[in-house]
Amino acid sequence: MTTPPPATQTPAARPPGAPHPAERPRRLRATPALRRLVAEHRTDPADLVLPMFVREGIDAPVSLASMPGVVQHTMDSLRRAAVAAAEAGVGGLMLFGVPAVRDAVGSGATDPDGILNTGLRALVQEVGDAVVVMSDLCLDEFTDHGHCGVLDGAGRVDNDATLVRYQDMARAQAATGAHMLGLSGMMDGQVAAVREALEAGGHTDTAVLAYSAKYASAFYGPFRDAVDSQLRGDRKTYQMDPANGREGLREATLDLAEGADVVMVKPALSYLDVLADVAGLSPVPVAAYQVSGEYAMIEAAAAQGWIERRRAIEESVVSIRRAGADFVLTYWATELAGWLR
């Protein structure tokens, strides 16, 4: 017996006098296969970077109430989470350290046996061939005042004295085998200073990721819980004014001239215009950081049933890619990578 041909859908009758649109964009939205075929942007697991926190002096991971699903890791749980991320196909890991002791100059940041440098060595050893191991190069987690640099006698962040500390950090982090150093402090001249230290130390293959347009944002609150920030006051004298877009281009242009291998915009969702502008001029890859407050808002709304969690996560990340980010730092990296695969 022959199989009958598949039934075809009979078009609905057109109402008398119905207009004929000159263009019908809906044709390319008619089926999932069509929508998939003509999609302008996609996210691949390799486009994702997972920020991670490792904390000194704990014997079990510590959950963060303001960031559901995110923890401060022990060294053992850090290794396990890194392996899970690598197996999911995540492209990179960005490590932040949470020390037990802090001081005015952030001594723990340059201690070869400090929590951050020890954690970086562990990641390189565990998954260094599979993912890009990135380090946070900033003093804020290590200072007892919580600022991203050292302070002068008047209590202001001393830009040039901080650059010397950043050079020390760069040498210490490069020695761990970290592949890329994330310069997040927003000091003037930081890329040139770090590049000089790396070249002089023979670390010519260590890449520099410049947090070029980093804004003094309200969306960093949960992150400060994650690193147990000791910040007093604010960072408005060195992080950027949220009102300024062109200034972000200026900062990125300066970092490119100083030798940045990657430039970044942070936060992401509130600054998609800046991200698009930076991507339009940059000859090097562009990153964006989907920060803790962005993560927390989606998680909180999803927990209330107000939005569809997975769809909101996927949409938020693809919007960052659409604006021009070559890769995205997101706390959903491992979970999202699993969905994408």
Image (cartoon, rainbow, N blue to C red):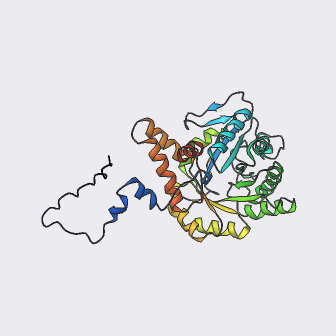
Place of residue 288 in the rendered image (x, y in percent of width and height, measured from the top left): 59, 56
Q: Is residue 244 something one can see in this rendering? A: no
Q: Is residue 331 above or below residue 267?
A: above
Q: Is residue 120 above or below residue 272?
A: above
Residue drawn at 54 percent across, 36 percent down: 68
Residue extending furthest toward the front: 1
Q: Is residue 142 above or below residue 187?
A: above
Residue extending furthest toward the left: 16
Q: Relative to the observer, which residue lies in front, 44 or 285?
A: 44
Residue drawn at 30 percent across, 50 percent down: 4
Q: Is residue 324 something one can see in this rendering? A: yes
Residue 192: quadrant of the picture? bottom right
Place of residue 333 in the rendered image (x, y in percent of width and height, measured from the top left): 59, 46
Specify whether 10 is left or right of 299: left
Specify whether 7 is left or right of 74: left
Q: In this figure, what is the number of numbered marks? A: 0
Residue extending furthest toward the top: 59
Residue drawn at 42 percent across, 42 percent down: 308
Place of residue 315 in the rendered image (x, y in percent of width and height, measured from the top left): 46, 51
Specify whether 28 is left or right of 167: left
Q: Relative to the observer, which residue lies in front, 146 or 78?
A: 78
Q: Relative to the observer, which residue lies in front, 161 or 206?
A: 206
Place of residue 79 in the rendered image (x, y in percent of width and height, measured from the top left): 72, 37
Residue 284: quadrant of the picture? bottom right
